[in-house]
Image (cartoon, coloured by chain):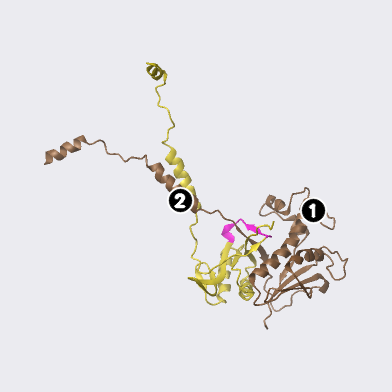
Chain colours: A yellow, B brown
Amino acid sequence: MASQRFERRTSDTEPGFTTASLPDIVFMLLIFFMVTTVLREQDIKVRTQLPEAEALTKIEQKRLISKIHIGPLKKGENQGETAIQIDDALIENRRAIRQIMYNKLQNEPRLIASLKVDVGSEMEVVNGVQQELREAGALRINYSSNRQNPPN
Amino acid sequence: MPGLLEKRRDNREEGEIPTAGMADIAFLLLIFFLLVTTINVDTGIGMTLPPKLEDQDPPPVKERNLFNIRVNAQGELLVEGEMATIGQLRQRVKAHVTNFGEEPDLSVSPDDAVISIKTDAQTPYDTYIQVLDEVWMAYREIWNQIARTGQTPQGDQVLNQTYDSYEAYRSTLEPQEENQIREAFKAQISIAEPDTGD
């Protein structure tokens, strides 16, 4: 009969949290992550294995970045020729870069051209693209690279 | 028949969607987006290309102020006319820019010193980035020193307070604020125009 005495002492309100607002909290978080997630901006058709470097700078303002991918074409297992990709399109004629970049520069004067170049590329392509960027007046560039693991 | 249906309806409880599973669904979606999200910051080596010159020669640079680095197709380095390795580069660049006119072959002052990197058409991009990185790191080390002491190597007072490193100083800057260290000790790295001949 001890248990009956115990029961009598408990308050009328049910114990436990109210989980009614839990979905609201979760939905709020969900919406946050849905908004911040960028699944994949573009379909990258060239392989770009970035080099490693130490003297890195961060680009905080993502809006300013315009990516230029340079690397071998992805063709299954074997690699194709070196190609240049800006946004979604592969650049057939290198001289077209200046017009594309010039137009971009009109929309965003503080544009930073982020060069995502594959480590195996030759400087001839990079120099060619740089000359085009100079023609367009897009002088701020960034050689995209990953942080080097300190040798220790 | 109609009577039977009606009877069933009577027995039925009030129609309501059970919302207990809602939280589970939301959690599942949440976990998916948590995994998929990468808040990555773009990092890289920043450079400013020289503006397009309209039929005019680039400004002349005195030979002693110029520090020539040439990288050939095999990734070998020619520094000031001699073979060198990437490992030596940082010290040599530092010696060049902080010479203050002492050695007759090195720069007159940091403001006059120009580091020129020239590559061949077949130079691997990887080697080029390594060379560029070493040159930048040479400047970074000097900037680190300025940040720690608040003074340039010449002894000019630049900062009112000291920082642990150049990056620590940089992180305190507002986007529009002037970078005092870089202003006091300018890095002048020139990416030479490629030869059109070969």
Instruction: Say what secondary structure mark 2 lies in.
Output: helix
Earlier sequence position, callout 1 versus callout 2: 2
In the image, residue A6 sits, relative to residue A61, either above or below, namely: above
Q: Magenta stretch: give its range.
A: A54-64
Residue A130: quadrant of the picture: bottom right
Residue B188: quadrant of the picture: bottom right
* Amino acid type, mark 2: Phe
Report x, y in % for residue B147: 76, 52
Seen at 52% across and 76% down, the residue is A92
In the image, residue A78 sits, relative to residue B19, either above or below, namely: below
| Residue, far left | B1
Q: Would residue B110 be visible to someone looking at this image?
A: no
- Number of other residues with Cα within 10 Å of mark 2, as a class: few under 14, some 14 to 19, many 20 or more: some
The chain ID associated with circle 2 is B
Measured Cα–Cα span from mark 1 to mark 2: 50 Å
In the image, residue A148 sits, relative to residue A121, either above or below, namely: above
Report x, y in % for residue A60: 61, 55
Seen at 67% across and 69% down, the residue is B127
Residue ID for mark 1: B158
Q: Is residue B62 left or right of residue B70?
A: right
Does the segment drawn in magenta span residue B57?
A: no
- Number of other residues with Cα within 10 Å of mark 1, as a class: few under 14, some 14 to 19, many 20 or more: some
Residue ID for mark 2: B32
Does the segment drawn in magenta span residue A57?
A: yes
Q: Is residue A65 left or right of residue B172?
A: left
Report x, y in % for residue A70: 57, 70
* Amino acid type, mark 1: Val
Instruction: Say what secondary structure mark 1 lies in.
Output: loop
Q: Quadrant of the C terminus of chain A?
A: bottom right
